[in-house]
Image (cartoon, helix red, strand yellow):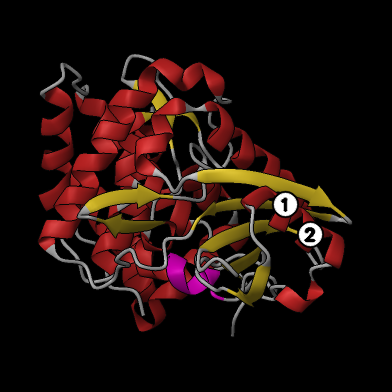
Amino acid sequence: MREPKPFWSDVPAPVRREIEALVGSPIRKGTRVFGGYGPSATFRIFLEDGRTVFAKGAGKGSNEVNWRVVPVEESAYRNIDAIRPFSPSYLGSVMADGWHLLLLEDLKDAAAVPPWTDKLAVQAVHDIAQFHLRGMPESGKVDEINVKGFTDNWRTIRYNREESDCFLGLFGEDRTEAEAWLNDSFDILIAAESELMRMDQPWGLIHSDIRSDNLRFRDDKLVLFDWALACRGPLILDVIFFFPSVQGEGGPTAERLLPVYKQAMSDQGVSFPSYAERAAAAATAGFFASRTGKPPIPALPRLRDIQRLQLGPALEWAAKVLSLPKPPPLV
């Protein structure tokens, strides 16, 4: 099942005319595009002069979240210089007749993942490091990361029976083994995730939602989009949150990729205290552990599946970093 996205035929004539004025060409046709897991309006627009542009935003049927994040993403494209080498070109925006669309360079010819190769994953991590280095001076242009949902997930699972049942239900016949693992691991997981927001580690501008549906490769270089969650936060969280999706989609593990990131940052004089990796690993695993087993969200029908894909690798990495026993496999 796919997300309930609007059709191009839903876009009113006044909005189309404003797009034509902005891009300098009549529109030949538009098609609805699927990629991410949300119900946002996303279109590929074919122009009479032969170009294509990508439009995304909110309009018919969009929910409150869609409307809230579009201005945030637009602000990132307009105001943050550091993202420009790593994102599609921003062409402008249109607000008319109950629609708000951002117009971006179309990445239809850029390479998508999966499949992941070691080379592509290493390149992605290297480029994320370069983005972090460029973005550190501009971190004041964005809000600080919202700590809710990052630093208290394992504690919530421990003390809320409904939450723990949702998590343990993911293990099927291994539920008893999973519960024993959890009880043995709680103290260490809770202590580690509570350190995520310490300020004595490198902070800066982070994307905070890097995964395969939010990136492409053009000329073997990383291109990131969906900047609506850009914020100021612990840099290492940005990559450790990314690694489970790479491994879950058949790519290399965090054990292979984290040294690439740390070396690229170290080459420019940025190093990480020992607790930072543990905190980010615990927080990432807790983020997916607290969400994956919950009921599906109608507007986001594929979300639980992609969270499950990431939960297994996230748990394995957290256990390794924190010297915990290996968790049982998910169903």
For disc 1, the marked residue is: 21
Quarter-wise, where is residue 214 in the image?
A: bottom left
Q: Alpha-carbon neighbours of circle 2 within 10 Å: few (<14), some, or many (≥20)?
A: some
Q: Position of residue 247 (x, y in %)?
A: 24, 63
- The amino acid type of the residue labelled 1 equals Ala
Q: Does residue 76 sit above or below 124 in this rendering?
A: above
Query: Bounds of the magenta span?
Result: 302-307
Secondary element at tag 1: helix
CA gap between label 1 and label 2 equals: 6 Å
Quarter-wise, where is residue 328 in the image?
A: bottom left
Q: Does residue 207 sit above or below 248 in this rendering?
A: above
Q: Which residue is the extreme one toward the front?
A: 49
Q: Nearer the viewer, residue 71 or 259?
A: 71
Secondary element at tag 2: helix
Q: Position of residue 211 (x, y in %)?
A: 38, 57
Q: Is residue 323 visible?
A: no
Q: Quadrant of the C terminus?
A: bottom left
Q: Main secondary structure of the magenta part?
A: helix
Q: Nearer the viewer, residue 7 or 279?
A: 7
Q: Nearer the viewer, residue 67 or 17?
A: 17
Q: Position of residue 299 (x, y in %)?
A: 69, 70
Residue 145 relative to residue 138: left or right: right
For disc 2, the marked residue is: 17
- The amino acid type of the residue labelled 2 equals Arg
Q: Is residue 170 magenta?
A: no
Q: Residue at x 36, y 42 (%)?
A: 86
Quarter-wise, where is residue 11 in the image?
A: bottom right
Determine contact: label 1, label 2, CB under 8 Å.
yes
